[in-house]
Image (cartoon, grey):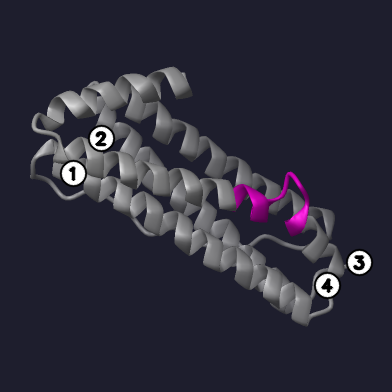
Amino acid sequence: MLLKPEVLSVLNRQIAHEASNEQIYRVFENFFAGYNLHGFEKLFASQAKGEYQHRQMLIDYVHDKNGSVDFIPTKAFSLKDGGELPSRIMEIMQKFLYVEEETTKMLYEVLETAEKSNDYGTCAWLKRPDGLILEQIEEEGLAQDMISRAELACKCQTPNIGILSWDIELLERFN
């Protein structure tokens, strides 16, 4: 069954969004590499890889349905210069959560569009146990956890020690 134009349109927007997310997470990875905070670096390398995989899943799905992918350019993203490391980490974790919440909203829009179009195949594909909807719930949970950890680390009497301890934990988790 071919994709209806309205479903194809939101899938193409989602593909572009996943590419943008990958770029944002590569910027974060690079930022932490510059501070030799390899746990944070690995966290965002893992996130970037996941965004690439999500984008590829979407592309494969569109192709399987004989659809055509419109490769929409992503907007450039960079971090502002300046500020103390603890506040920069909090800024990055807040952006991480924002990106994941935005992704959730967009995936729900894809699902709603598919439902309204009676595209039950796309609905089922999105809701699979290894599908994007359930994966997104995990991603938002991780981002929420990182916000909580950032708040704790940044409120320590010695935030840099809290950050270093957190970095070691992340390195063990994502290495």
Q: Quadrant of residue 12?
A: bottom right
CA distance for labels 1 and 2? 10 Å
Q: Nearer the viewer, residue 120 or 13?
A: 120
Q: Nearer the viewer, mark 3 or mark 1?
A: 1
Which residue is tagged 4? 119
Magenta part of the chain: 126-136
> Percent from the top left, x then y, of residue 30?
30, 33
Label 3 with label 4: CB-CB less than 8 Å = yes
Q: Within 10 angstroms of label 1, few (less than 14), some, or many (20 or more) residues?
A: some
Is most of the magenta stretch helix, strand or loop? helix
Q: Which is more N-terminal, label 2 or label 1?
A: 2
Label 1 with label 2: CB-CB less than 8 Å = yes
Which amino acid type corresponds to the residue marked 2 in the rendered image? Phe
**Looking at the image, is 175 positioned above or below residue 83?**
above
Q: Nearer the viewer, mark 4 or mark 1?
A: 1
CA distance for labels 4 and 1? 43 Å
Task: Please tell me the numbered disc located at residue 88.
Answer: 1
Task: Please tell me the numbered disc located at residue 1.
Answer: 3
Which amino acid type corresponds to the residue marked 1 in the rendered image? Arg
CA distance for labels 2 and 4? 42 Å
Q: Which is more N-terminal, label 1 or label 3?
A: 3
Q: Which is more N-terminal, label 1 or label 4?
A: 1
Q: Nearer the viewer, residue 65 or 138?
A: 138
Residue 171 lies within the magenta run: no
Q: Secondary structure at mark 1?
A: helix
Which residue is tagged 2? 31
Label 4 with label 1: CB-CB less than 8 Å = no
Q: Secondary structure at mark 3?
A: loop
Q: Is residue 139 left or right of residue 75?
A: right
Q: Which is more N-terminal, label 4 or label 3?
A: 3
Which amino acid type corresponds to the residue marked 4 in the rendered image? Asp
**Looking at the image, is 173 positioned above or below residue 17?**
above
